[in-house]
Amino acid sequence: VASAKGSDDDDSDDDAAPAAAAAPAAGTAPKTDGLFDEDDFDDFIEDDLGIQQALKREHEASIRRAGDGPGRAEGVSQMQMMDMVDIFGAEGFEDDEDAIVAAKPKQSSLSRFEPTLLKEHYISTDDEKIRKRDIPERMQLRSIAAIRRTRVAFERDVDAEAAWVANKLRRGAALPATVDAVKRVLQYYNEEALEPPFVAAYRRDYLVGSDVTPGELWAIYEHDQEWANLSKRRRDTKKFLRTVYDAGRDEGVSLAAGKTAASTIDDAAHADCREFVRKTALRHGILTAAAKRPQRREAAYWAAMRSAGIEAYARKWACSPASVAASLEDEKLSVPPTPSEYPDMLALDYVGAHKGLDTEAKVRDAGRQFLARELAHVPAVRAAARREFRRLAAVTTRPTEKGRAKIDAIHEY
């Protein structure tokens, strides 16, 4: 009886096994296409977030379909595929793989929506790239010069940058403790990709002992981007200076007066250096095919002065641009060369050398004009002129009848 009972139980278990296999397991959700699940009809009535939810479901479904790959059978594991290869051979499957590779990728379903709509709901391609990187979005959207800065370049210039930023914050010479605190904040921004609010909340203890406050973290952040942009301009300026120097080496081009300006972190100095290099190239006849008419006219002027001997005449009694730049940078007076004869007597040798140089006075005026135009583009001269202008400039105002009528003691201005 016991054996019969056991056989009956075995038969009942065998009969129940196929039924249990055929029936879906309890607690498992029915298979859906990933777009319109049963739970999705709960928010059929659209509200403010309806379109955002629909776009999100559409985006997730497209990612799942792209991950499955075209032509791949669902529910087939890797082991089952290996068994099929052992039974039927690998030739047919190799053809299928070639066909899968040759198949064109399906176009994303997000292409049906307007780009502005995708951007508004943060599901565009750029937003997806930002989400994949484990870096705050603000740090990814910095200026190109700050993003592309390498770790080696940052570590090489971090001390100079910290001193520059600290001096900017204090509008003068900063204390060593301030420079150290700024350096630590710059390392948080560039090496650990931490945002100013995070540093103010969780790294403010490292600012103790300095006069840097959490409210100045945003200013350090902006100065860091400015330094990165100026560093890129410095590299571009040096490259431009080297290119012109190599092109005019046979012509005796001297760009020593612009080397100091090319190495500084100052936007005005870079602009002065590039202008100086351009004028020097025109003075020596180094022109590009894209040179415009004013540049060609100026190059013709310098060529005429050189052919008339005005440059050689001015060099006999005036300093060179390089010596003037060195004098201004070192604050040492350079003595001009002593001519063998009085300049008026030297000018007699150049009378008639050019069409407009028919008198001694015109030769002297041409020499002074040559030197003035030459020195006007020296970066050190332009920087000294700006300093003197800022030191001596004054703004004066006088009240008008309209101002007297509208602006009184209680006016906001």
Image (spheres, helix red, strand yellow):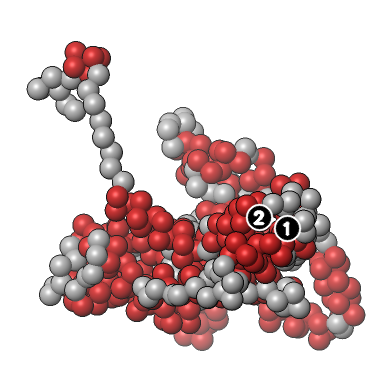
Q: In this view, does 67 lie to the left or right of 95?
A: left
- Pick whichever of labels 1 and 2 is earlier in the sequence: 1
The image's mark for residue 360 is: 2
Identify the residue at image location x=77%, y=56%: 352
Q: In which quarter of the image is the C terminus?
A: top left
Nearer-the-camera pick, 109 or 334:
334
Name the residue at 72% across, 52% down. 357
Locate residue 7, reporting x and y percent: 55, 81
Whether residue 67 is situated above or below residue 108 in the rendered picture: below
Name the foreground residue: 128 vs 35: 128
Quarter assignment of residue 258: bottom right
Q: Position of residue 290 (x, y in %)?
A: 78, 54
Residue 402 location, quadrant: top left
The residue wearing badge 1 is 351
Q: With respect to residue 369, does 321 lie above or below?
A: below
Q: Which residue is drawn at 52% across and 75% down?
A: 338
| Residue 8 visible (yes or no) | no
Secondary structure category for the residue under label 1: loop
304 sits left or right of 200 in the view: right
Residue at x 90% of width, y 80% of height: 91
Res 379 seen here: yes
| Kind of residue at disc 1 | Val
**Would you say the residues marked 1 and 2 are in contact, meaning their CB atoms lie under 8 Å apart?**
yes
Count of all numbered marks drawn on residues in the image? 2
Q: Is residue 211 left or right of residue 341?
A: left
Q: Where is residue 192 in the image (x, y as percent from the top left)?
A: 37, 74
At label 1, counting other C-alpha atoms closer than 10 Å, the crowd grade (few under 14, some 14-19, many 20 or more) is: some
Between 354 and 206, the one lying in front of the other is 354
Q: For residue 118, which numbered disc appears in the image?
A: none
Looking at numbered disc 2 in the image, what kind of residue is underneath it? Glu
The x and y percentages for residue 270 are: 51, 63
Q: For numbered disc 2, what is the local secondary structure?
A: helix
